[in-house]
Image (tube, rainbow, N blue to C red):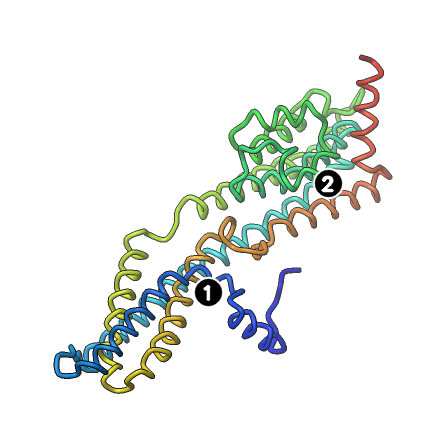
Amino acid sequence: AGVRYTSADWFRNVKSLVLLKSDILRRISGHLFFNIFVAIIGAAWHAYSPETFLNLGTTGHSLSGAALSLLLVFRTNSAYDRFWEARKILGSVVDNSRGLSRIAPTALPPQQAHEFGRMIVAFPYMLRLHLTGRGQVPIKDTSDAPDVLPYIDDKKVETIESYFSKPFATLSLMNQILHSKNALYPDEDPEKTLVMLPQRQILQRNVNLLAANTGACERILGCPVPLSYSRHLSRYLTVWSATLPFVLAPLLGWTSVPVIAAICWSLFSIEEVGHMIEEPFAALPYDQVQTKRVADVIKRDTLSMYKQQLGIDLADEVSTTKQTELASA
């Protein structure tokens, strides 16, 4: 399960902020230090030359602060919508993969069922590599190699890596298995064919749904929040916060420096949270979008289903195949 916040974590969260271990604080540190520097200049100017100090008053920031708040809310909400859509798509990937693993063991001849099951195991890991910016990295060089390589032979690995999109390569192999002439039972009679045909149609439908799920994930990955919106918010926030010392220094003196630091930290953090959750597959630390857990769940359920229905271990089947190939060579 993913990392969840509880009210008991408040002290640890504050400690990570004080000790500068916060990921968000590190990401906004440059912007924050710039505004603290401007706040020090503003407080010093007011302290040593109050007659020349540029006092902007509070009216402008009070009126523009409401617009800034709305921009921040809309920005964060639009980013969270993308995060939540990604979670729903990955949930659909789990459902469609479970549908495949439930039907394939009995809808296909044993050899084809075994090959199909191994592709079900491989698919979520290939999707994970594709979405996290590792789609062109050889599978053996990724952190997911121990989870997936025991279930696909060298020939399948070579085929998958020859495609630009590894998940679509895996789905293509599933299609080839479904439409292979070997996917029919030996001496299959017409009644048997009619009985099995609806199940095979369900397999094809679920493969098509996985292709649609992959496309939906790519839509999120390839279409960020419009750049002009993010840039305008960043400029607005920078100008608003940089002029804040000329509002608070006459009211608070040197105390305005920590007050401005706290205000800027809170506003910059909200903006940065929006940037982080905008890219649910690649930008979030700790894999909060759960691509690894999704892949592991599909693998676990597929292995369990094949073990229950056919009494086999898909990894052992690959090892046996490789040993046979070496012996024949």
Q: Residues within 10 Å of mark 2 (few under 14, many from 20)?
A: some
The image's mark for residue 103 is 2
Q: Is residue 129 above or below residue 60?
A: above
Tell me which amino acid carries mark 2: Ile
N-terminal of the pair, mark 2 or mark 1, is 1
At x 56%, y 42%, the residue is 209
What x and y, as percent, mark residue 57? 18, 82
Q: Looking at the picture, tell me which residue is in the foreground, 288 or 13.
A: 13
Q: Secondary structure at mark 1?
A: helix
Q: On the picture, is 309 further left or further right than 57?
A: right
The tag on residue 262 is: none
Considering every residue shown, the one lying at the far right of the view is 311
Q: Secondary structure at mark 2?
A: helix
Q: Rate crowding at label 1 as few (under 14), some (14 to 19) or many (20 or more) other CA atoms within 10 Å.
A: some
Q: Quadrant of residue 245?
A: bottom left
Mark 2 or mark 1, which is nearer to you?
Answer: 1
Specify whether 56 is left or right of 38: left
* Residue located at (60% from left, 28% from top): 160
Give how far apart the Cα atoms at labels 2 and 1 are: 49 Å
**Which residue lies under the disc numbered 1?**
25
What residue appears at the point 73 percent right and 40 percent down from the top-left corner? 103
| Horizontal side of residue 186 vs 44, given as left or right | right
